[in-house]
Image (cartoon, rainbow, N blue to C red):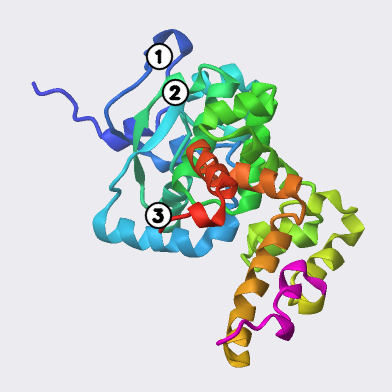
Amino acid sequence: MAGKRVNLSDLASEPALPEARKPAITESTPRSARVQQVAANPLNTRDLDADRAKIESIAESLKTHGQLQPCAVVSRDAFLRIYPEHETTIGSAVWVQVTGGRRRAAALLVDQPTLEIVVKNNLADSREAWVSATAAENLDRENLDPIEEARAVQLLVQECGTAKAAAARLSRTPPWVTQRLNLLKLAPEVQSLLRAGEVPLRDVRDLHQVPTEEQLDELQQRQQPPDPELTAVNQTASSSEVLPGNSTEESKQRTPRRSAVATAIRRLGGTPDKIAESLRSELTPADLQLLIDRLQRRPDNMTG
């Protein structure tokens, strides 16, 4: 007589096996898991509520094309070994998501019953490994806003112990890490402007040095058009320096370029030390050395 047929969906909803019977999976090929069995990453610094439009876009793609890329997860036990304090947060989930937070949110939005997952328990070898994997995923692929980046970096620094160690984990420079941490010292109003894209990052690089209650006023002053009479660069653009053979109109046409340079200098910090710090955080060592070489050349030796 044929055996009783088993409904696979019923098996998927059964409680997890006792610890002694669980396989010690470190990595696997993609598999399906019920969405309710996959808990969101409790340490993900991305604000999913603020990313509603992108999640809705992913949801439409899921309905049309299905899930094209699996979410990396670890087993419940692997996660709780390093974060036992989050047992209540993940509830009864069998898996904990490392990457793919927006894909999971999109699946819930369209009532998709399952997620494609790949198990990588090695990402839960330590807290440092976990936070590093989460931060690297977000920074390299998810286009976080600067404050979300700063929060991810802050978590990694806490686990690594130093900004230098965190920078090595992220393949970034220590000044870049320091710059992101300084963003968390900004007033909430300034952080909101930065997150909304209403203020460029270059305008707030050193704003943390200003008392919190004065930062918004200082930022508004920085965004005012520069006064040509007060900038050293534009002092050379007076009408008395019109060269023979050049009209006054031609001289006026050059003034905006000088004004732009003055603005850039001020936004980089205004002093050699602050300008150097800003450039170190953005340029590669090779580009920095090239810039030094260019600055040390005499103008008559410059080519191209």
Q: Secondary structure at mark 3?
A: loop
Indicate the amino acid at tag 1: Lys
Indicate the amino acid at tag 2: Ala
Residue 235 is covered by the magenta coloring: yes
Residue 23 is covered by the magenta coloring: no
Q: Which mark is residue 16?
A: 2
Q: Which residue is mark 1?
A: 22
Q: Which mark is residue 138?
A: none
Q: Can residue 280 be seen at all in this image of the molecule?
A: yes
Q: Can residue 85 be seen at all in this image of the molecule?
A: no
User: What is the span of residues highlighted in magenta in the rendered image?
Assistant: 230-245
Q: Which residue is mark 3?
A: 111
**First reached walking from the N terminus: tag 1 or tag 2:** 2
Q: Nearer the viewer, residue 186 or 232?
A: 232
**In contact (CB < 8 Å): disc 1 and disc 2:** yes
**First reached walking from the N terminus: tag 1 or tag 3:** 1
Q: Residue at x 32, y 56 (%)?
A: 62
